[in-house]
Image (tube, helix red, strand yellow):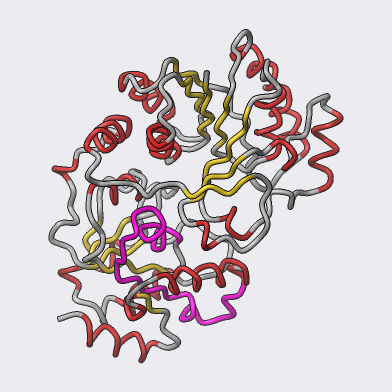
């Protein structure tokens, strides 16, 4: 018996892939409702028939800034988790989260504490942030709540799509996870069903440049001003904006860009349905730009504008910046991964590559 713990919508893409790679036939899916459409996603996941059971857990995800009240509320929800998981015994549990509190609640709710625990890639942070790097008070809080702190001692394996990018030591055996295969009709059809995605509505076919609009940030980045300058450099008829899923609406509509309407669809689901190798993906600093290479081994042209924001960009983090550079080094054609140092450099590059 196997359990898969999914924390955010994109994990509902990873779960079918992982279970197919590992030839798992009997799995219960547990989804944590961090998204507004959680009930819809869960119901669609049930209808695929991929899982023996699909359960909705209470929201046990910490969100920053962390407060004591939030921690206490989540800790109390562990009793609901225990109730839902009561009587179920799993030999293997897949975790798609690197959160100590969440993982500790799940682990402490398991009947079989000797289960094999597999951590599945959860974004890019595990590549450069050790799982053990947590606030000391979080361990204390978990222990005082009479739970076992699920630190690295309990991790048997960690699945990564691109282990060569791993920059820090992580607990558990490192296993290369097979790339996602667009030719796998079963995977694509099941994922599209879960997300209600209709590839016939894809508006990227006639677009060469996809602008990934940055999500909300606390830094004073002049998003509008930057993309206003870009609008005078690139061929606008070939460009389209995909707003960030956490935005209620995009902020660039006043600049004349075409806007992708179904922006709440995860980028990874969209790219599963369309080869991005012949596209250009632009952003200030969005990790969505580097994921086609990691997930599919695609090499879309990538243009990152973080050096043009007008002030010190190192707040993105040295580890993150170094990681992005290491993704560039994986490119067979290095010219397709460009980080301009100035607006003149960007203008020259675009003149050379766009008609």
71 over 78 or under it: above or below = below
142 over 286 or under it: above or below = above
Q: Position of residue 240 (x, y in %)?
A: 24, 62
Name the foreground residue: 175 vs 93.
Answer: 175
Q: Number of marks in the image?
A: 0
Name the foreground residue: 334 vs 138.
Answer: 334
Q: Residue at x 72, y 42 (%)?
A: 152
Q: Residue at x 40, y 29 (%)?
A: 23
Would residue 229 be counted in the magenta stretch? no
Q: Identify the image quadrant of residue 235.
A: bottom left
272 over 198 or under it: above or below = below
Q: Identify the image quadrant of residue 25.
A: top left
Q: Position of residue 232 (x, y in %)?
A: 26, 81
Q: Quadrant of the C terminus?
A: bottom left
In the image, 191: left or right of 27? left
In the image, 64: left or right of 29? right
> Furthest-top residue in view?
87
Q: Residue at x 33, y 80 (%)?
A: 229
Q: Position of residue 263 (x, y in %)?
A: 32, 48
Which region is colored magenta? 287-314
Q: Position of residue 95 (x, y in %)?
A: 57, 35
343 over 58 or under it: above or below = below
Q: Residue at x 61, y 60 (%)?
A: 128
């Amino acid at each position: 018996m196997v359990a898969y713990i999914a924390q955010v919508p994109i994990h509902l893409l990873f779960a079918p892939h992982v279970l197919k790679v590992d030839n798992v036939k009997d799995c219960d899916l547990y989804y944590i409702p961090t998204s507004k459409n959680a009930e819809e996603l869960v119901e669609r996941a049930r209808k695929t028939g991929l899982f023996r059971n699909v359960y909705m857990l209470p929201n046990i995800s910490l969100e920053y800034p962390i407060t004591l009240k939030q921690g206490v509320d989540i800790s109390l929800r562990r009793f609901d988790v225990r109730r839902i998981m009561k009587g179920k015994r799993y030999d293997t549990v897949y975790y798609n989260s690197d959160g100590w509190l969440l993982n500790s609640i799940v682990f402490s709710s398991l009947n079989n504490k000797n289960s094999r625990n597999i951590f599945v890639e959860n974004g890019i942070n595990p590549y450069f942030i050790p799982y053990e790097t947590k606030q000391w008070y979080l361990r204390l809080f978990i222990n005082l709540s009479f739970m076992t702190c699920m630190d690295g001692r309990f991790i048997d394996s960690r699945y990564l799509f691109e282990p060569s990018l791993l920059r820090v030591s992580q607990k558990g055996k490192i296993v290369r996870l097979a790339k996602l295969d667009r030719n796998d009709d079963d995977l694509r059809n099941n994922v599209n069903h879960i997300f209600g995605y209709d590839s016939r509505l894809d508006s990227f076919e006639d677009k060469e440049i996809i602008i990934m609009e940055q999500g909300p940030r606390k830094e004073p980045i002049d998003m509008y001003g930057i993309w206003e300058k870009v609008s005078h450099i690139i061929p606008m008829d070939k460009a389209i904006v995909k707003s960030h899923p956490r935005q209620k609406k995009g902020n660039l509509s006043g600049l004349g860009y075409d806007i992708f309407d179904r922006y709440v669809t995860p980028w990874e689901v969209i790219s599963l349905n369309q080869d991005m190798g012949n596209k250009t993906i632009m952003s200030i600093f969005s990790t969505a730009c580097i994921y086609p290479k990691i997930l599919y081994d695609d090499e879309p042209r990538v243009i990152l504008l973080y050096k043009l924001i007008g002030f010190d960009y190192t707040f993105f983090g040295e580890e993150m910046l170094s990681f992005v550079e290491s993704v560039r080094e994986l490119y067979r054609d290095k010219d397709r991964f460009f980080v301009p140092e100035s607006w003149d450099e960007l203008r020259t590059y675009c003149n050379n590559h766009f008609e």
